Image: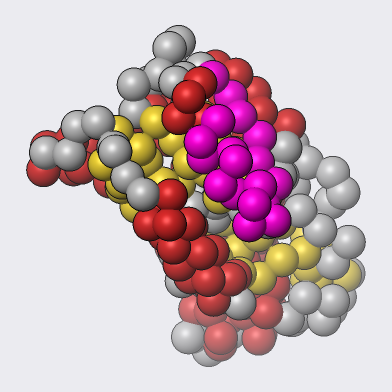
């Protein structure tokens, strides 16, 4: 397991790193918000431990950035302030847990393990193809770590296609399973929505994933 710790107090950071190292965890440290964001973009982490009072970018704003770019990674926020208002700000920023200083390392360790277990269970509900991720619980979509905003109809179409990835899906199937309608051969509404979806998940990315099979329908595949 690999952890990113963003903490400007070197003594606290050293104490946390020593504890996790003794448990066999890998841990990177960033001492300010800007460096923490750069580390996040470059690395692949299972958990982020994030102080609130950070130089350059504060913890609340940094947490928002992390969650916008990949909301699958759990974030634990650390702070000397433990009022309800502070906790509310942390959770509204997207934090998954909140721990007030000072704390026992054992408590932090238990919280990290609990979050990663929960994340593993949620991962079972994440459908993937190449760098495309569809979370069927959160109804969220990411491509190369970037959030893709879809309408409810676009999301339903994508979920059906990724559940049947590598399989050619006819317009009739889409009409019945996604639209819950009898197929009308005189309408191009399905083709229109496929094009909407293609622009959002494929236009700015590679490889292209949503393909048209002439005379047969559509398929989601690499």
Q: Is residue 39 visible?
A: yes
Q: The C terminus is located in which quarter?
A: bottom right
Q: Judge whether 191 appears above or below 49 on screen.
A: below
Residue at image location 84% in from the left, 67% down from the top = 221
- Measured from the top left, where is residue 174 in percent x and y? 62, 79
Residue at image location 61% in from the left, 77% down from the top = 124
Residue at image location 66% in from the left, 70% down from the top = 127
Q: Judge whether 26 appears above or below 138 on screen.
A: above
- Res 30 quadrant in image: top right
- Measured from the top left, where is residue 53 in percent x and y? 34, 21
Compare residues 7 and 125 and report the one nearer the observer: 7
Q: How many marks?
A: 0
Which residue is most to the top? 56
**Position of residue 129 in the picture relative to residue 195 (left or right):** right
Q: Is residue 45 magenta?
A: no
Q: Judge whether 183 appears above or below 200 on screen.
A: below
**Position of residue 174 in the picture relative to residue 130 (left or right):** left
- Magenta-drawn segment: 14-31
Q: Is residue 20 magenta?
A: yes
Which residue is most to the left? 84
Compare residues 186 and 68 and report the one nearer the observer: 68
């Amino acid at each position: 397991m690999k952890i990113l710790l963003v903490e400007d107090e070197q003594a606290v950071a050293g104490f946390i790193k020593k504890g996790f190292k003794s448990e066999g965890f890998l841990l990177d440290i960033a001492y300010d918000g800007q460096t923490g964001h750069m580390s996040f973009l470059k690395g692949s982490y299972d958990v982020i431990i994030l102080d609130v009072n950070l130089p350059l970018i504060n913890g609340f704003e940094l947490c928002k950035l992390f969650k916008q770019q990949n909301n699958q990674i759990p974030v634990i926020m650390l702070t000397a302030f433990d009022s309800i208002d502070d906790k509310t700000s942390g959770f509204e920023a997207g934090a998954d847990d909140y721990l007030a200083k000072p704390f026992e390392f054992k408590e932090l360790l238990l919280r990290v393990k609990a979050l990663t277990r929960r994340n593993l269970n949620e991962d079972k509900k994440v459908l993937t193809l190449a760098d495309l991720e569809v979370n069927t619980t959160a109804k969220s979509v990411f491509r190369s770590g970037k959030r893709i905003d879809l309408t409810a109809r676009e999301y339903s179409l994508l979920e059906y296609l990724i559940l049947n990835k590598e399989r050619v899906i006819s317009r009739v199937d889409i009409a019945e399973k996604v639209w819950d309608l009898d197929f009308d051969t005189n309408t191009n509404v399905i083709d229109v929505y496929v094009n909407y979806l293609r622009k959002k998940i494929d236009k700015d990315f590679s490889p292209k994933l949503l393909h048209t099979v002439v005379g047969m329908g559509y398929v989601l595949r690499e």
